[in-house]
Image (cartoon, helix red, strand yellow):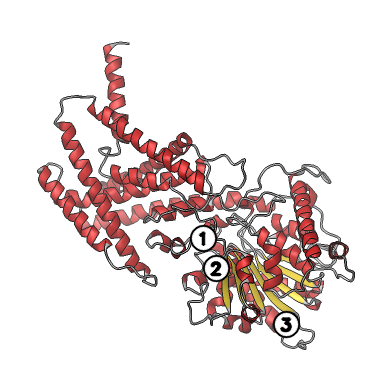
Amino acid sequence: MTDGSLNWFARAGIAIATRVNPLTGGPAAPLKADALLDSFGPSLMPRKSLHQGLAGGLALVSAELIGHSVDLIARKIAPPDSPLVWRLGVRAAMAAGGAAVAGITEADDEPTSRAALRSAGRLTAVAAGGGIIYETGRDLEGKFDWPLLPMATGIGGFSFVAWQMAQELRTRQGVVMRWTDDDKPASLTGSLGIAMGVGTLGRMIGNSFLISRRSLDEYLGGDAGQVVVGRVFNLAFWAAGAATLYGFMVNRLSRLNGQVEVNFSSPPSNQFVSGGPNSISPFEELGLQGRRFVTEVVPPSQIDETLGETGAVHPVRVYVGVDSEPLYATGRSELALEEMGRLGAFDRKYLLLVSPTGTGWINHTVTETAEILARGDIATICIQYGKAPSFLEVHGVSLGRAQFRQLLWGVRQRLIGVPEAKKPKVLVFGESMGAWSSSDVIMHQGIAGFDHYGIENALWFGLPGLAKWSRTGMREGRSPLTPKGTVAAFDRFEQYQELSDEDKGSLRAVIVDHDNDPISQMSLRLAVKRPPWLDGEPRRNVPKGMRWEPLITFIQIVADAMNATVMIPGEYKSFGHDYRADTLDFVRAAYDLPSLTPEQAIAIHEMLVSRELDRAGRIKAQEPGELQVPSEMMKGSVQ
């Protein structure tokens, strides 16, 4: 090896070591190291390297943005060529000011703006403190005449932080429940590699944004008005690019809605379901989830066999796909109402109105359970409003609300002239985004919305924390629109059983939100305010030692949500965003359906598991009539 190559390698090593130095790698380096370490701490869900790496990468991007913003302000007051004492003094003053703001008294019912101000103060104090460490470290490095010192300190500091991350990983793997013993937990090298890749990508995007802004400033000139025009145009350009990319992802994933599976490709001969001989809802327009839904109705013979009874009638299933009247949302609601009349839905004892998730998915376990418990005397009605996975269809919640409101009001009008003795009981169900869209419609008026639309009871699984009802405190019964005893949220059925018969009878809305369901716990407020579910008595499946940090905990919950919808066919769990194990008990209790003997409950569970395994096998099949035994986890992307 020549001296020249050695010098080149040495310079390259110094550059890399300097970049990853958690103390002097940049003004935001200490804050980034702290944020990355926090992202490895305990949270609600188990993680693979991908999820952990994404959480770490987003933490790095956020920390760099905050750190550089604080440093930019400090450098305007104390430029880099000013005396060290002045630079440190300015940062110390900013840290003290941030700490003072962070000391604002905290209250449970405080406005989000107050919490945001306090968190901003806390982040400013930490970022300014990191700037002090950075300035001091760079000054000390400059006083030593040893070119390899930056490499030594960089490698040493990075190794120490990596060792701490390894400790955090071991801790979280010991306290966070796993889906199965076969889960492959996140590795340090994989997680760190992905985190640094995401962080680098975020830095490149940020630098590109600044470069394009600077170029526009230079092109338009230095006049203040021209600068404003250039920056507005630059922001609009990047926003348009982001919107285009988002639209591309939605369109690509929406194509799955048109996929035709071999075992769900033929219109049903059943006269009681959409797509059948009596239907005006075309089978080919039902979409992937709709075709599964209408094909999977529980026949009366299986209901009788499971319950050991006789006399079950045929359930009705109504489904209107988003491709039916794609430009006319009200038309889909009108089509559903017409379909209900043609298929005999209004002749059933129960009408179960369901709002689906982003892809149009409905929890089959809920529908099948309701059909069995009602002895088939039930009609389930659903209108699809999106095609892509829920995390890409958040913008579709408004459409889902509009369609569900039209459906509710249409049913209400149809039943006005029906004698009370013949009037079906109207029930509502929604899970995840379906719970969001349907609850917003009903709870706009609080519990009075139930009487306004003629609804008897509602059951919601995994109600997102972003829902209006959640944000206004109605879920916890804190709103004056929800009288005491009319609504309650449960983590598990044992909590419901603790209520008195009188309290159970007064419930109009039952919400099942697992303590460790990140989708139900997620809210923008979480980024600036410590959530109540981390206080008080320990909660089921919320790991001991989980702590709250501004922004970082929100990022952790977002990463957890990516892994919260795992469903293993036939293995019912009351965990994360999987509510299948809670379904039988809560469907019967929330809707006041006929009681069961212990033997019937066992038989229903066995039948539901059998149907789910059969359905999973037929979904995986490549040839008509083929049945494959599902061997892998089915991810929640169907939602």
> Which element type, helix, strand or loop, lies under badge 3?
helix
- Of the two numbered discs 2 and 3 on the same chain, state the one appearing first in sequence: 2
- Horizontal and vertical percent position of residue 570: 72, 51
- Residue type marked 1: Arg
444 relative to 49, above or below: below
Classed neighbour count for the residue bearing mark 3: other residues with Cα under 10 Å, few (<14), some (14–19), many (≥20): few
Q: Is residue 119 left or right of residue 273?
A: left
Judged from the image, the secondary structure of the residue bearing numbered disc 1 is loop
Residue 30 point in image, percent of width and height: 29, 43
Which image quadrant: the C terminus?
A: bottom right
User: Reading the chain from its start, which is encountered first: label 1 or label 3?
Assistant: 3
How many residues crowd around disc 1 within 10 Å: few (fewer than 14), some, or many (20 or more)?
some
Relative placement, left or right, of 490 versus 530 is: right
Q: CA distance from mark 1 to mark 2?
A: 33 Å
Q: Residues within 10 Å of mark 2 (few under 14, many from 20)?
A: some
Looking at the image, the residue that sits furthest to the top is: 2
Which residue occupies 18% across, 32% down?
A: 141
x and y percentages locating residue 337 in the rendered image: 72, 74
Point out the image quarter for the N terminus. Answer: top left
Q: CA distance from mark 1 to mark 3?
A: 45 Å
The residue singled out by tag 2 in the image is 398
Residue where numbered disc 1 is placed = 539
Q: Is residue 355 visible?
A: yes
Q: Nearer the viewer, residue 354 or 482?
A: 482
Whether residue 400 appears in this view of the structure is no
Q: Which residue is mark 3?
A: 414
Which sits in the foreground, 470 or 348?
470
Q: Nearer the viewer, mark 1 or mark 2?
A: 1
Residue type, mark 3 in image? Arg
